[in-house]
Image (cartoon, rainbow, N blue to C red):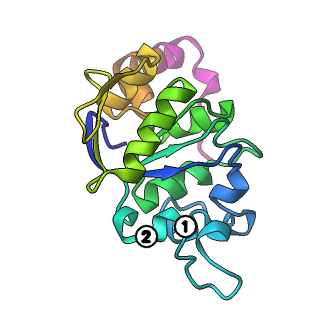
Amino acid sequence: MQPFRNLRGIAAPLPLINVDTDQIIPARHLKTIKRTGLGVALFESLRYDDEGRERPEFVLNQPKYRNAVILITGENFGCGSSREHAPWALLDFGIRCVIAPSFADIFYNNAFKNGMLLVTLPKDRVHALMEEARTAPDPTFEVDLEAQEIRTPSGTVERFAIDPFKRHCLLNGLDDIGLTLQHLDAIAAFEARRRQQFPWLDPRPV
């Protein structure tokens, strides 16, 4: 998993609440187990009309925000059914950080396990950041996970809290497999003891 330390790039405002996982990535795109190729379907019903043409009013279709890496949005983001494809689609598009007043629990955990930083801030502070992203000529924000700070084009510095374990995993690029691989020596030692104590558990050659 790619480590997350400092992210600098375009922040896009999405002033919607209760954005569910089917809006993030429709169920018809869940047939794949690959993490790539889903970005084109991100927010599909919001980005495209019934003919597949881009809706010019949608924020990620606007030239200013096409290369956004940060999304600032409303409360309860990621609600609805559980699907790991939701953070995959955001990451494949290029979004590595989402800032909101609250997130759905399953989406929240899925996002961190896939290397995405979710920042929870009070609603008034999120609205202020969203407004700055909307009005700034160059909406380039910086998210510094090591310092736990968001820095805006106007010079505002917004501190945020994060679970220490999730922070450690992001900074070091550790998903569940990576965490397990840190204990290879202990696993090997356990397997050696098991083979000595319970040799009948080993599979026998056919």
Dominant secondary structure (helix, strand or loop) of the stretch shown in magenta: helix
Indicate the amino acid at tag 1: Phe
In the image, which disc is placed on residue 29?
none
Q: Marks 2 and 1, Cα distance to the nearest angstrom?
A: 7 Å
Query: Along the horizontal axis of the image, is 168 left or right of 140?
Result: right
Per the image, label 2 sits on a secondary structure element best described as: loop
Residue 50 percent location from the top left of the image: 71, 83
Any magenta on residue 77? no
Residue 4 percent location from the top left of the image: 31, 36
Foreground residue, 32 or 103?
103
Tell me the residue at 71%/49% (across/down). Answer: 20
Which residue, as the protein is rendered here, is positioned at the far bottom?
51
Residue 205: quarter of image: top right
Span shown in magenta: 191-205
Residue 33, placed above or below residue 181: below
Q: Residues within 10 Å of mark 1 (few under 14, many from 20)?
A: some
Indicate the amino acid at tag 2: Gln
Tell me the residue at 53%/39% (across/down). Answer: 111
Question: Which quarter of the rendering shows the N terminus?
Answer: top left
Residue at the spot of label 1 = 58
Tell me the residue at 42%/26% (across/down). Answer: 179
Residue 13 percent location from the top left of the image: 48, 50
- CB contact under 8 Å: marks 2 and 1: yes
Query: Along the horizontal axis of the image, is 34 left or right of 20?
Result: left
Which residue, as the protein is rendered here, is positioned at the far right?
81
Tell me the residue at 65%/43% (across/down). Answer: 78
Residue at the spot of label 2 = 62
